[in-house]
Image: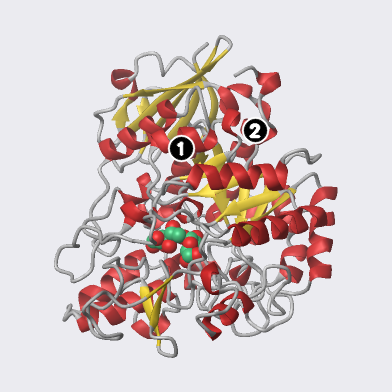
Amino acid sequence: MAVEEASWWTRAVVYQVYPRSFSDSDGDGIGDLGGILQRLDHLADLGVDVLWLSPIYPSPQADNGYDISDYRDIDPLFGSLAQLDELIEALHARGMKLLMDLVVNHTSDAHPWFLDARSSKDSAKRDWYWWRPPRPGFAAGEPGAEPTNWQSFFSGPVWELDEASGEYYLHLFDRRQPDLNWENPQVRAAVHEMMRWWLDRGVDGFRMDVINMLSKDVGPHGELHDGPPLPGSALGDGSASYLCGPRIHEFLAEMHREVFAGRDGTFLTVGEMPGVTVEQARLFTDPARAEVDMVFQFEHMDLDRGTSKWDVRPLRMRDLKASFGRWQTGLADVGWNSLYWDNHDQPRAVSRFGDDSPEFRRDSATCLATLLHLHRGTPYVYQGEEIGMANFPFRSLEEFRDVESLNHHVQAMSAGADPASVLAALRTMSRDNARTPVQWDASPHAGFTTGTPWLPVNPDHTEWNVAAQREDGASVLAHYRRLIALRHDLPVVALGDFTMLLPDSDEVYAFTRSLDGETLLVVCNLSRTTHRLAELLPEAPAAELVLGNLADDDPAELRPWEARVLRLA
Ligand code: ISL
């Protein structure tokens, strides 16, 4: 891809804000738009180009806003439309863009569309959702009467019985998140109209929640099919019926046509796609097909999982290289990657993939950052990642808030699991690890709120906070600033070809990036062992250092968690 022809977002870095936990301006313990407006200098100082805002629409907050009851307003918890307008203006004045979260696989069960649909089998909106009678031969409510055997992402069956009509409705996530029926053209038109309304307001695009789940594999008479049984469960895996279903490309191409085509401006669309394959991602992100600009894929997030996300296994370096390498190669000539370690659904990367011991926390956080930001694709920084925020030291079940964690606990207990092991898995994998308040300073609530934070502040904030790192050139924050600037400055970082090196090393991750005669060699030691660099990569010791994460390098040695970006030619 020629540098001049490349889209603006190939040089961009996205910063994700999870508003509830970012910064609270009114003392109710929940972050809000006022808080974001007060912290824009932090984003400008970091140098990011795009702000992606997790949902701030009116919502009963069953899934912290991923259950929307009004697509065209702001929840008073977070502020007002006037403040959103102010945010758009303030971001644009700083040369940044705003991505809204688009959650249209499902609504809240409190959305007027669903209330209408539920009110009667004859409702004009009934078909906007997925309603089905009990399985033939079963009475409504009887175990096994669910229309299919699919397990929900948040534990239990995906079907909830509506007592009044005796029919079930589908919810791939929580029962308070009923799935919209995208087969119905009225649903699609209503979503397109809503998207245009936001673009007219000035937003610059959307991050599209579980967008590869819109199309369900439904037969000509409305048939949905059971999936293969899950081990040790009465439920099955229905994913073949809803991941990248038969009409998904048609729906996304139509959305692009209806919402973006012919509109002036520079937009960004990011499809969040659990379970997407490289081959599918090539189709979704091929510019010639005009569907989405990039996808958020999860393969690397599944490498440390056994039978489920709660069954945690050690990450094997070779698997990580094989996975990242496959995505880099697969989207080298067509399409584009999103790059991330952290987001609001994952435990903190420095605890999960790095080493959050006092000795190596800073070094491993900066090493992981270097590895990621030097890949080809658009990097995402999740709030707090830029200061090395780590998992929370949860002690008891009462400390968790996340619906996924709580549903899992209920389900595991009823299945007779050992309470201590369930708690241990929650501690390691719960999404609440990512959702503790951002640590702005060392004061009692970390400068996040003057009230009581909705989720406790990590006690390590006295040491790990933005204020402590802002002026420190050796901090994690300063390193992120340098990585972001490097992408802006060097076309080879944005667009260079990727080649994986040392695929079989269990500790050293190395690759090159090359563009127009310039080659960067990136070497990252993901371990506590010192390695002889000269033996691993003989050309490395003599190469020019572009960026490193440790001071006083001995060019021949790669120290624990050391990362170096070197110029070979
Ligand atoms: O969080 C997960 C695993 O722990 C994922 O399965 C996650 O639910 C999936 O990636 C989809 O995530 C998105 O949609 C969900 C919402 O809860 C997540 O916060 C959102 O990012 C339903 O809207």
Q: Compute the Cα span from label 2 to label 1.
A: 20 Å
The residue singled out by tag 1 in the image is 281
Ligand 1 neighbours mark 2 (CB distance < 8 Å) = no
The residue singled out by tag 2 in the image is 11
Above or below for 443 versus 372:
below
The residue sitting at the left extreme is: 232
The residue lying at 47 percent from left, 32 percent from top is 282
Residue 248, percent across and down? 48, 47
Q: Nearer the viewer, residue 5 or 196?
A: 196
Q: Can residue 48 be seen by looking at this rendering?
A: no
The residue lying at 41 percent from left, 49 percent from top is 245
The residue lying at 36 percent from left, 71 percent from top is 158
| Marker disc for residue 367 | none
Residue 483's quadrant in the figure? top right
Q: Nearer the viewer, residue 199 or 439?
A: 199
Ligand 1 neighbours mark 1 (CB distance < 8 Å) = no
Q: Nearer the viewer, residue 75 or 169?
A: 169
Residue 299's quadrant in the figure? top left
For mark 2, does the 10 Å Cα neighbourhood hold few (<14), some (14 to 19), or many (20 or more) residues? Answer: many
